[in-house]
């Protein structure tokens, strides 16, 4: 198998996108003061988090809903909850 | 104060239609209780992911010979443990024909299909399945007891709420049964589901008919992060993935999405999945804290089952969760029936759940493996030992024009080179024997 | 009578009628027969159809003009088809065209092959190609029956141009009164300037990444700098109503094949990309590096469109020839 | 007033599998309610809520349409009753067949004031069935309806055409196909989902509604269903500072002779 980027892999998955209702919010004010690791930038299996122009951005649409980021965030700077009922990743096989 | 007068009331609300939730709903509905089974996904299983091996014993007790009806993939007959370095690997291969006959020991399952089937059993028994609803919080009565759930603006009452809402268990946290999950008590599971023709899988894994293989991979699989890799055969797909302890992942600053691709490109693994087509990529938290992670299991009006209760065993050879989840659901259902007979749904009234769990295989197994999380936090397991083993094998099989070294001296030199003292070795061996 | 005798075309829009005439004519050589345009409206429209290459026009006069819904032609057209049994009736896919086609089909006891993007004649049979599953699949089918009804979108066929001699065979037909009536109470014009995306050589397409209607001015600047037409994805035209529907590209909208397509804030859902995938060159500007559009572009600019688009307009204006 | 909303369960297009030979398989696809039909249901619900009356959902198709998940899903969106005509002969039915079977079912259901249809189905999107049913019933039939009002027992609707919006008035009963922006479908609530399992469902066979075998005969032969042709792209990601990246794009376009 050829190596695939994370976004290519997410592209294979099925999502019910809840447009206009992000289920992740990053409180950057907390990150800036409290967080050195910025673990969210690497622990997320879906690479949801990235740093863009000095801001931490959550591209929540590709979220696999594992919760890794929330557990890994040392400073409680992530508002992470499941998407609204029926939305988000849909595992066909799981 | 919430107005609870206008809402429906049920005997039991089960939050989460995974294996634990659906089993509990099935058992309670079968006894004539009014059960609502709430699932946030569009269908049961749509949010669930696991490596995929279901040990049959606990479900077989509840739904005898369930494999005849349920969408199971393959029965596990070939168990393989692989110690891996970047370029070499050392395998322990165990095949047992007895495992290919009923009562089977274990099956691979795909949760999107299997959980759906299990929830259908609960529905057939009379439980009402409510998909596409995310439960946001528990409702409390005057004494702080849990009296129901809220989803958005809507509320629903019940004598008991079962939190079967998975590893993140927001509900158990909200109900005060557990605190924040520490990073060393969970693993990050990432999995790729790779499609291959059925015959190819059977040929590569040496399988007959519905036989299946379960590979556990230690060492380079996780690039030194505490944890391991797995490879399970389904009918026409392979589940390949890693479970990595979150604290160690954070410390190593590795990206799980990259580590799994490196894992799959290891020659040994690559050969097995060659030509396959990725059909799904998923991730899930795996409770790995063992007994230490378990929350309080019961409070007034609520109990916690399955992953939400932190029930998981990972001894390196096998990763278990679903059978424990089913066992816990059975204990919870029994406890609720007894509490109902006494009409006491307080912590005391439901307290039998903890005792039943205590007596059942679930906690017995959790206790047996109580030391494994600690054992598996041993760094040597991921670096030194796989390297030693493969060094040793390399030396045994490499023939140079020099006199052969004796095995013992080869071994001790390899240990030295890999920074392992005899003391370490003996201690780890002992601790492994005790904890696995 | 399975002989391929006549192809009829109908659209309420003259430019569309012209394209359908072109399409119909391209099928005629294989089979002989003649091409008939059905025209509802003024005599000038009927004459125009002849100049576009129709062998004959069936003309239903409409002295009341746009006060009468075009669909009123349905009973009349159904009777003509029943009497004359053309082999194929090709109808332009506008919303009115769909209504005419569907209602005709019900009257004639047949189905409609909708939104064909290719129509060929093979081994004595028509073969139609169209998209299903929102562009996720192509379906090939052979319609059966005495008269085949098909609809085709703008740009599927090429207009032959006004080259044919005037005069020709214009036959006036009698109105069959509809069984029911609708009353036109009011009419609101959506957009004055007509657009033909299909003919555009360069297209700048607006997607959901553009946050506000006012920000369209950025895209307009870019379109001016490129000398391109503005198009959009479906939500921009149908949910947000920022642009008229005829500017949207996609499975149910326009199918374009310009020399250059520039997607601005277009994510690249398949429902859209099927309408632009045949473009000669595709450029996308999107802040989301994971956007599916990037898997089908020649050149990608990943970043904030509010930074990149003005820079691009500027660079285009300043470029040395 | 009695409103019938026709809907179509379809295989989820996102579950399409392209086989090695380029053909398409939906064998493993999840069946869902066609999303455009949900907008029609919502429009019907709003009318019934405003004017009183009941909403009846109706679908015809192969056995997949009668799975309990789909029935419950539809009823949890509000309709009071559900009617299904189930027969495997209806798998892959063309629009003419579907329209004829729906028309027969509507006749059997009794009196109605309005039949609503979504814009098109999620699988085929031919946007035909509503028009054909209305014509077969010989009642006012309109498509592209983006607004429905009632005035003194008559319908006043807005019809969104390509370049204009018509405001039209007509009588009832009528058949209307609505646009996707007519009404944002509500998400089923916990209580509606619970209620859904108790609502009446009527299932008919083709014989029950007096449809003869010949009626379901297809009017076309499907020769092939394939993945769309794939165009190879250069996939060059222009890196660097915004100004530099933009300049490299202009240079590239110039070099390619596009400008």
Image (cartoon, rainbow, N blue to C red):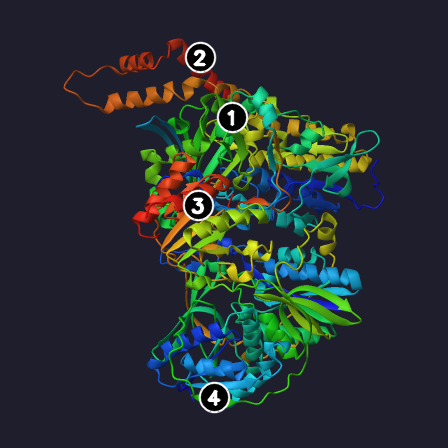
Q: Quadrant of residue B411?
A: top left
The residue beneath circle 3 is C313
Mark-to-mark CA distance, 4 and 1: 77 Å
Q: Choose mark 2 or mark 3, whichever is in front.
A: 3
Q: Which chain letter matches label 1?
A: A
Task: Confirm or deny contact between disc 4 and disc 1 (CB under 8 A).
Answer: no
Find disc 4 in the rendering and name its residue.
C170
Closer to the eye: label 2 or 1? 1
Towards the viewer: C119 or B182: C119
On whether disc 3 and disc 1 are found on a single subunit, the reply is no
SS state under label 3: helix
In this rendering, position of residue D10 left or right of residue D175 = left
Q: Are marks 3 and 4 in contact (CB under 8 Å)?
A: no
In front: mark 4 or mark 2?
Answer: 4
The residue to which callout 2 is attached is B427
> Are there few (<14), some (14-19), or many (20+) residues within 10 Å of tag 2?
few
Callout 4 touching callout 2 (CB < 8 Å): no
The Cα atoms of the two marked residues, 3 and 4, are separated by 51 Å
Q: So how many labels did they put on this image?
A: 4
Residue behind mark 1: A39
SS for callout 2: helix
């Amino acid at each position: 198998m050829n190596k695939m980027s994370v976004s290519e892999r997410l592209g294979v998955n099925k999502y019910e996108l809840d447009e206009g209702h992000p289920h992740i919010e990053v409180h950057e004010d907390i990150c800036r003061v409290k967080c050195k690791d910025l673990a969210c930038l690497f622990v997320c299996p879906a690479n949801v988090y990235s740093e863009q122009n000095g801001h931490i951005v959550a591209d929540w649409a590709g979220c696999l809903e594992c919760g890794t980021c929330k557990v890994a965030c040392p400073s409680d700077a992530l508002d992470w909850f499941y998407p609204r009922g029926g939305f988000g990743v849909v595992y066909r096989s799981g | 104060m919430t107005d609870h007068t206008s809402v429906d009331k049920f005997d039991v609300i089960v939050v989460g239609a995974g294996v634990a939730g659906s089993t509990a709903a099935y058992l309670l509905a079968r006894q004539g209780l009014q059960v609502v089974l709430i699932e946030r996904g569009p269908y049961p299983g749509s949010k669930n992911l696991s490596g995929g091996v279901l040990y049959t014993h606990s479900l077989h007790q509840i739904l005898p010979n369930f494999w005849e009806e349920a969408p199971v993939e393959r029965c596990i007959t070939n168990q393989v443990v692989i110690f891996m370095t970047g370029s070499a690997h050392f395998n322990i291969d165990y095949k047992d024909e007895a495992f290919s006959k009923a009562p089977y020991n274990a099956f691979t399952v795909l949760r999107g299909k299997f959980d759906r089937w299990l929830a259908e059993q609960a529905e057939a028994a009379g439980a009402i399945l409510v998909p596409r609803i995310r439960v946001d919080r528990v409702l409390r009565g005057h004494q702080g007891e849990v009296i129901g759930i809220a989803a958005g603006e809507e509320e629903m009452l019940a004598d008991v709420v079962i939190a079967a809402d998975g590893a993140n268990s927001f509900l158990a946290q909200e109900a005060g049964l557990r605190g924040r999950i520490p990073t060393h008590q969970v693993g990050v599971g990432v999995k790729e589901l790779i499609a291959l023709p059925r015959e190819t899988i059977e040929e590569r894994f040496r399988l007959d008919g519905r036989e299946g293989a379960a590979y556990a991979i230690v060492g380079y699989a996780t690039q030194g992060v505490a944890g391991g890799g797995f490879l399970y055969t389904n009918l026409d797909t392979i589940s390949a993935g890693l479970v990595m302890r979150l604290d160690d992942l954070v410390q190593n600053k590795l990206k799980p999405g990259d580590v799994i691709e490196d894992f799959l490109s290891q020659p040994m693994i690559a050969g097995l999945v060659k030509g396959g087509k990725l059909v799904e990529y998923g991730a899930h938290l795996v409770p790995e804290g063992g007994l230490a992670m378990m929350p309080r299991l019961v409070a007034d009006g609520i109990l916690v089952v399955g992953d939400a209760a932190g029930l998981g065993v990972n001894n390196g050879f096998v990763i278990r969760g679903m059978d424990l989840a089913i066992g816990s659901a059975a204990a919870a259902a029994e406890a609720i029936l007894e509490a109902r007979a006494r009409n006491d749904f307080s912590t005391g009234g439901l307290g039998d759940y903890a005792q039943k769990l205590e007596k059942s295989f679930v906690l017995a197994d959790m206790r047996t493996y109580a030391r494994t999380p600690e054992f598996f936090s041993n760094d040597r397991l991921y670096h030194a030992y796989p390297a030693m083993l493969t060094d040793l094998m390399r030396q045994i099989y490499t023939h140079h024009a020099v006199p052969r070294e004796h095995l013992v001296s080869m071994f001790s030199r390899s240990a030295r080179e890999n920074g392992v003292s005899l003391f370490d070795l003996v201690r780890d061996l002992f601790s492994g024997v005790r904890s696995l | 009578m399975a002989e391929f005798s006549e192809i009829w075309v109908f659209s309420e829009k003259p430019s569309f009628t012209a394209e359908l005439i072109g399409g119909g004519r391209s099928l005629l050589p294989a089979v002989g027969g003649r091409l008939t345009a059905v025209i509802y409206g003024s005599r000038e429209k009927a004459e125009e159809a002849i100049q576009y290459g129709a062998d004959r026009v069936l003309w239903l006069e409409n002295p009341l003009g746009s006060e009468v819904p075009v669909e009123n032609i349905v009973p009349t057209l159904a009777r003509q088809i029943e009497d004359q049994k053309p082999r194929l009736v090709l109808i332009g896919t506008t919303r009115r065209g769909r209504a005419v086609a569907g209602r005709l089909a019900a009257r004639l006891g047949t189905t409609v092959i909708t939104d064909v993007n290719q129509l060929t004649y093979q081994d004595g049979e028509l073969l139609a190609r169209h998209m299903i599953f929102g562009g996720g699949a192509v379906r090939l089918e052979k319609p059966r029956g005495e008269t085949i009804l098909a609809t085709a979108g703008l740009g599927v066929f090429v207009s032959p141009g006004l080259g044919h001699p005037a005069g020709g065979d214009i036959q006036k037909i009698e109105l069959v009164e509809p069984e029911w009536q609708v009353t036109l109470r009011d009419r609101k014009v959506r957009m004055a300037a007509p657009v033909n995306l299909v003919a555009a050589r360069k297209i700048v397409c607006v997607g959901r990444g553009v946050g506000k209607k006012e920000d369209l001015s950025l895209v307009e600047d870019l379109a001016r700098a490129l000398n391109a037409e503005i198009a959009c994805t479906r939500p921009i035209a149908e949910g947000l109503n920022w642009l008229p529907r005829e500017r949207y590209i996609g499975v149910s909208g326009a199918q374009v094949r310009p020399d250059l397509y520039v997607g601005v804030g277009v994510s690249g859902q398949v429902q859209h990309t099927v309408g632009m995938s045949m473009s000669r060159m595709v450029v996308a500007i999107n802040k989301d590096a994971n956007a599916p559009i990037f898997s089908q572009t020649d050149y990608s600019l990943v970043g904030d469109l509010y930074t990149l688009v003005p820079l691009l307009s500027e660079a285009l204006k300043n470029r040395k020839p | 007033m009695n409103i019938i909303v026709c809907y179509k369960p379809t295989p989820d297009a996102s579950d399409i599998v392209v086989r090695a030979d380029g053909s398409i398989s939906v064998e493993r696809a999840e069946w869902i309610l066609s999303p455009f039909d949900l907008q029609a249901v919502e429009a019907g619900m709003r009318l019934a809520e405003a004017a009183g009356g009941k909403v009846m959902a109706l679908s015809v198709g192969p056995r997949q349409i009668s799975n309990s998940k789909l029935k419950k899903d539809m009823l949890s969106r509000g309709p009071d009753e559900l009617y299904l005509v189930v027969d495997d002969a209806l798998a892959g039915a063309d629009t003419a067949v579907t329209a004829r079977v729906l028309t027969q079912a509507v006749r059997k259901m009794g009196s109605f004031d309005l039949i609503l249809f979504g814009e098109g189905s999620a699988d085929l999107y031919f946007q035909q069935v509503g028009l054909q049913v209305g014509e077969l019933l010989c009642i006012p039939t309109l498509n592209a309806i983006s607004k429905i009002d009632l005035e003194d027992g008559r319908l006043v609707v807005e019809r969104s055409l390509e370049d204009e919006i018509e405001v039209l008035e007509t009588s009832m009963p009528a058949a209307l196909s609505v646009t996707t922006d007519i009404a944002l479908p509500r998400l089923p609530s916990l209580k509606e989902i619970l209620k859904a399992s108790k609502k009446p469902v009527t299932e008919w066979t083709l014989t029950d509604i007096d449809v003869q075998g010949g009626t379901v005969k297809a009017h076309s032969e499907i020769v092939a269903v394939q993945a769309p042709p794939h165009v190879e792209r250069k996939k060059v990601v222009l890196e660097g500072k915004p100004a530099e990246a933009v300049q490299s794009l202009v240079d590239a376009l110039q070099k390619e002779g596009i400008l």
